[in-house]
Image: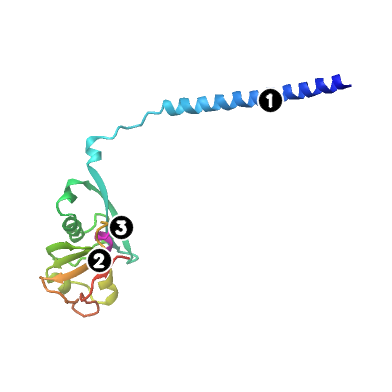
Amino acid sequence: MKKKEGILVVVILLLIVLALGGVLIFYNKDSEEENKIVNEYTPQEEITEDQLQNTIISLYFINKETKEINPEARTIKVNLLINDPYKYLLEQLIEGPKNEKLEKGIPENTKLNKVELKEDILYIDFSKEFIENAPKGKENEQKIIETIVKTVTELNEVNYIKILIDGKENEAFADKEVTFENTFPQD
């Protein structure tokens, strides 16, 4: 009887060992197959030197239909941002969107006099056309400011903007709905 029990235990252990061996062989076969696929991967296209010199920026404009602020992504050469990134971004806002469904927030004929970063505040000096040619109404004026704030605060070092008009602080839009006495924070 003991002999039969012993044989039965040996047979059960042998079956367990064989089952585990089969699982391990199957698992290793799958792993080899996965490794083979990974090792044979080749990119569809090599990254060119020109692509390494590009970056994507977001400029914010007003949607013509919804009047919401929407981003417009642009691929540009990195070297355009090296010397004065704030000036470059603001000049792009002044030029306006490339997307026909968007319109620029910065009023027509506005010129950028000067841009200067002090600590985390970006001082932006616009020409008088910024206030003279702006559409009236608090909502319209806030959207103009929002397009500027959202665009320049994409750069990590900018948390606030301060708007000057021809070098003067504490100016306001023509209807005095929105003034430039304080800084405008990022959202």
Tell me, yes or no, whether the two marked residues, 3 and 1, touch with CB atoms within 8 Å: no
Q: Nearer the viewer, mark 1 or mark 2?
A: 1
| Frontmost residue, 172 versus 130 | 172
Question: Residue 166, relative to residue 50: is it above or below?
Answer: below
Quarter-of-image position of residue 59: bottom left
Three-letter code, disc 2: Tyr
What residue is shown at x 15% (from left), y 62% (from top)?
A: 116
Q: Which residues are magenta?
A: 149-153
What residue is shown at x 17% (from left), y 73% (from top)?
A: 131
Indicate the quadrant containing the N terminus: top left, top right, bottom left or bottom right: top right
> Residue 73, image x and y in percent?
29, 52
- Look at mark 1 in the image and give the residue it sits on: 19
Q: Residues within 10 Å of mark 3 (few under 14, many from 20)?
A: some
Three-letter code, disc 1: Ala
- Callout 2: helix, strand or loop? strand
Tell me, yes or no, whether the two marked residues, 2 and 3, touch with CB atoms within 8 Å: no
* Residue at the extreme front of the image, as rendered: 2
The residues bearing labels 1 and 2 have C-alpha atoms spaced at a distance of 67 Å
What residue is shown at x 24% (from left), y 58% (from top)?
A: 157
- Look at mark 2 in the image and give the residue it sits on: 160
* Residue at the extreme bottom of the image, as rendered: 176
- Mark 1 or mark 2, which has the lower sequence index? 1
- Mark 3 or mark 1, which has the lower sequence index? 1
All told, the count of numbered labels is 3
What residue is shown at x 25% (from left), y 39% (from top)?
A: 52
Question: Residue 169, relative to residue 187: is it above or below?
Answer: below
